[in-house]
Image (cartoon, rainbow, N blue to C red):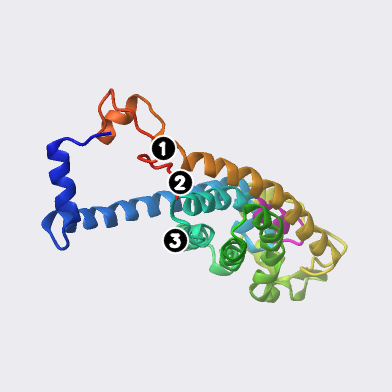
């Protein structure tokens, strides 16, 4: 695709170091990066809230079975897709870690301003789970293996297994047994009973009776391995979806005129965003 003389002049100005055009372009890049970061943070946080939010909102819902199983699976949907996009375009194995950092940042903003300041729930009830170590492991496996197949097998399995281990140091204090009016409870259950959440599934949930709900035991191990098996499948599916999305930049369509192309321009793969690195 040939450039017009005006487009060539603009390109030459952009390539000059410390020119006014290059400085403006760099400022525009920073502005776009900030917008994309807030968009990813909001989208990922909404996705996690609607799928695994009930288990992550409240400390008494962070149980030994469903919280351990559901959370890594629903996180893998967005993380695998963004990891594929970053790796296909930039060869940077940082997509999972960036998504994890943005999710944690969005969750802490939501829990502090929405749950704590607005609804007056204590932070000991609404703290979010830690996901950054799992994301670091996933990026590390991709960086060392450079294979999405090995990352789907080793990385996704470790992603799920590291979730309960990473959060155990935070959650252990809430699994201390206490006796309240002759009933054996955990500290997390007692906090949940004290701060009732009416008209929500959290208020209607049937608490386990007859035994103390601990975070240990074989149920947690079985749940973590089952979650790891599902995460392998989810990673393979959403890596390919993210890979497909990464190749959409060069597709000819009626919207290409908004990107500076003419109606009759034929954009090749090498000229578009989907070119091979």
User: What secondary structure is marked by label 1?
Assistant: loop
Upstream in the sequence, badge 1 or badge 3? 3
Compared with 276, 135 (above or below) is below
Report the residue marked by disc 1.
269
Asked whether residue 22 appears in the rendered view, the answer is yes
Mark nearer the viewer, 1 or 3: 1
Where is residue 138 shown, x and y percent of the image? 61, 62
Where is residue 204 shown, x and y percent of the image? 70, 48
* Mark 2 neighbour class, 10 Å CA radius: few under 14, some 14 to 19, many 20 or more: few
Cα separation between marks 3 and 2: 38 Å
Cα separation between marks 1 and 2: 8 Å
Residue shown at 59%/59% (left/top)?
Answer: 146
- Circle number at residue 109: 3
Cα separation between marks 1 and 3: 41 Å
The reply, left or right, for residue 90 in relation to residue 198 is: left
* Mark 3 neighbour class, 10 Å CA radius: few under 14, some 14 to 19, many 20 or more: few
Upstream in the sequence, badge 1 or badge 2? 1
Nearer to the camera, 183 or 152 = 152
- Circle number at residue 276: 2
Q: Residue 61 sits in which quadrant?
A: bottom right
The reply, left or right, for residue 164 in relation to residue 84 is: right
- The image quadrant where one finds the N terminus is top left
Q: Are marks 1 and 2 in contact (CB under 8 Å)?
A: yes
Residue shown at 54%/67% (left/top)?
Answer: 122
Upstream in the sequence, badge 3 or badge 2? 3
The residues colored magenta run 62-73
User: What secondary structure is marked by label 3?
Assistant: helix
Residue shown at 84%/59% (left/top)?
Answer: 209
Where is residue 123 shown, x and y percent of the image? 54, 68
Nearer to the camera, 2 or 263 = 2
């Amino acid at each position: 695709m040939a450039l017009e003389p005006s487009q060539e002049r603009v390109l030459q100005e952009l390539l000059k170091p410390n020119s006014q055009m290059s400085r403006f372009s760099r400022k525009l890049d920073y502005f776009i990066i900030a917008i994309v970061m807030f968009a990813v943070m909001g989208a990922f946080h909404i996705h996690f809230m609607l799928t695994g939010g009930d288990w992550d909102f409240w400390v008494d819902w962070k149980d030994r079975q469903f919280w351990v199983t559901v959370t890594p699976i629903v996180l893998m949907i967005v993380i695998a897709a963004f990891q594929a996009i970053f790796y296909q375009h930039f060869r940077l194995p940082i997509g999972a870690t960036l998504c994890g950092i943005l999710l944690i940042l969005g969750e802490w903003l939501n829990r502090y301003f929405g749950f704590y300041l607005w609804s007056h729930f204590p932070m000991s009830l609404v703290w979010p789970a830690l996901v950054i170590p799992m994301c670091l492991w996933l990026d590390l496996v991709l960086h060392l293996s450079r294979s999405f197949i090995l990352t789907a097998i080793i990385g996704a399995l470790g992603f799920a297994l590291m979730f309960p281990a990473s959060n155990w140091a935070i959650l252990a204090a809430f699994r201390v047994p206490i006796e309240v009016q002759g009933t054996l409870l955990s500290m997390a259950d007692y906090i949940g009973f004290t701060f009732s959440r009416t008209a929500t599934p959290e208020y209607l949930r049937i608490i386990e009776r007859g035994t103390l709900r601990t975070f240990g035991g074989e149920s947690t191990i079985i749940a973590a391995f089952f979650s790891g098996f599902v995460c392998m499948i989810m990673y393979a599916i959403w890596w390919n979806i993210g890979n497909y999305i990464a190749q959409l930049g060069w597709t000819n369509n009626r919207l290409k005129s908004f990107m500076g192309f003419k109606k009759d321009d034929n954009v090749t793969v090498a000229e578009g965003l989907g070119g091979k690195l």
